Amino acid sequence: MSRDEVFSGTAARGSDFVFNEEVATVFDDMLTRSVPFYLEQQKLIEEIGSQFYVPGTSIVDLGCSTGTTLIRLANRVTSASRLVGYDNSQPMLDKAKENLEEAGFADKIDLRLGDMNDNLGDILIENASVVTLCWTLQFIRPLKRDALIKKIYNGLVDGGVLIVTDKVLTNDSNMNRFFIDFYYDFKRRNGYSEEEILKKREALENVLIPFRVDENFELYRRNGFQIVETFFQWYNFAGFLCVKSES
Ligand SMILES: C[S@@+](CC[C@H](N)C(=O)[O-])C[C@H]1O[C@@H](n2cnc3c(N)ncnc32)[C@H](O)[C@@H]1O
C-alpha cells in the first residue's frame, strides 16, 4: 500500500480536494489513517450487508473508490452474483479494477463511471437489496441529496437496506470544535503532520459538507425509509442503517 503524502512538502496547496490519480494511488492508506475504525466500519458494513441481502437481487456501492467495500461484500455474501460500483473518478475506478482483478472478482463486480451530482439519471439502482454510500454522501451537494436518497429508496426491494457512513456535525458548535480536535489527535497518532492536517482541512473546506445526525435521520425518513438507526459513532463520524420496510 503506497503511503499517503499528498499534503506533505512545503508548497502551499490552494486548490480544492479532488479524487485524482495521485489520491487514487495512496487512497487505501489515506482512508485507514484518516477514518477512525475504518476496517472495523467495513466489517460492520459487510455484516449488515450480508444480513439484508436477498438472493437474486443486486448490491450497489455508490462512491466505490478503490473497491474495498465491494470486495469485502463479494467475499462475505457468496450467493450475490450481481455487484455494481459507481464512482465519478476514473483514476479511482482504474485502481478498483486492479484490486478486483487481484481479488479474483473482476467478472462478478461491474464498475461504472457515474456522477451523483450532475447525472443522477446515469446511475441505475434496480432490484437492489443492499446499497452502500460510504464516506461519499458528504461530497454530494446538499441540494442534490434528497433526489439521490429517493432514487436509492425506489431502487431497493422491500426489506432492503441503505448503509451510509459519513462525517457528521454536532448540534452544538462548541462541541464540534472539541470533537474535531480529538479527530486531529487521531490523525497525528497516525503519522500526519500539523501541516498535512491543515492543508487537507483547507482543501476539503468547500468540498466536504457534513450534516448533523438529526439532519441525516430527517433526510432518510422524508425520502421513504421507515427504519433508520445509527450503527456506529466515533466523535464526528457516524454510520446509519436505513431499511425500506413497506409491509
Ligand atoms: C471518501 S471516498 C469513498 C470511500 C469508499 N466508499 C470506501 O468505503 O473506501 C468518496 C468517493 O466518492 C466519489 N465521489 C465524489 N463525488 C462523487 C459524485 N458526485 N458522484 C460519484 N462519485 C463521487 C469519489 O471519487 C471517491 O471515490
Image (tube, helix red, strand yellow):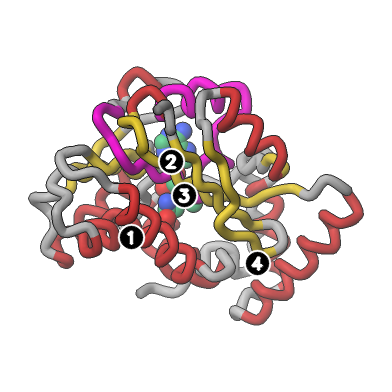
Q: Which residue is mark 3?
A: 134
Work out how far the residue at label 3 is from the one at label 4, CA to CA, in angstroms.
23 Å
Q: Residue at x 28, y 54 (%)?
A: 70
Q: Position of residue 103 (x, y in %)?
A: 17, 66
Badge nearest the viewer, 4 or 1? 1
1 vs 2, front mark: 2
Q: Which residues are magenta?
A: 125-152
Classify mark 3 as within 8 Å of ligand 1 or not, answering yes or no: yes
Q: In terms of sequence position, does the residue under pointer 1 or pointer 2 come before the other?
A: 1
The answer for how far apart the CA atoms under marks 3 and 2 are is 10 Å
Classed neighbour count for the residue bearing mark 1: other residues with Cα under 10 Å, few (<14), some (14–19), many (≥20): some
Q: Which residue is mark 2?
A: 162
Report how far apart the C-alphas of labels 1 and 2 lie in the structure.
17 Å
**Mark 1 residue CB less than 8 A from any atom of ligand 1:** yes
Residue 11 screen position, x and y as percent: 64, 61
Front of the two marks 2 and 4: 2
Q: Which mark is residue 196?
A: 4
Mark 2: which secondary structure?
A: strand
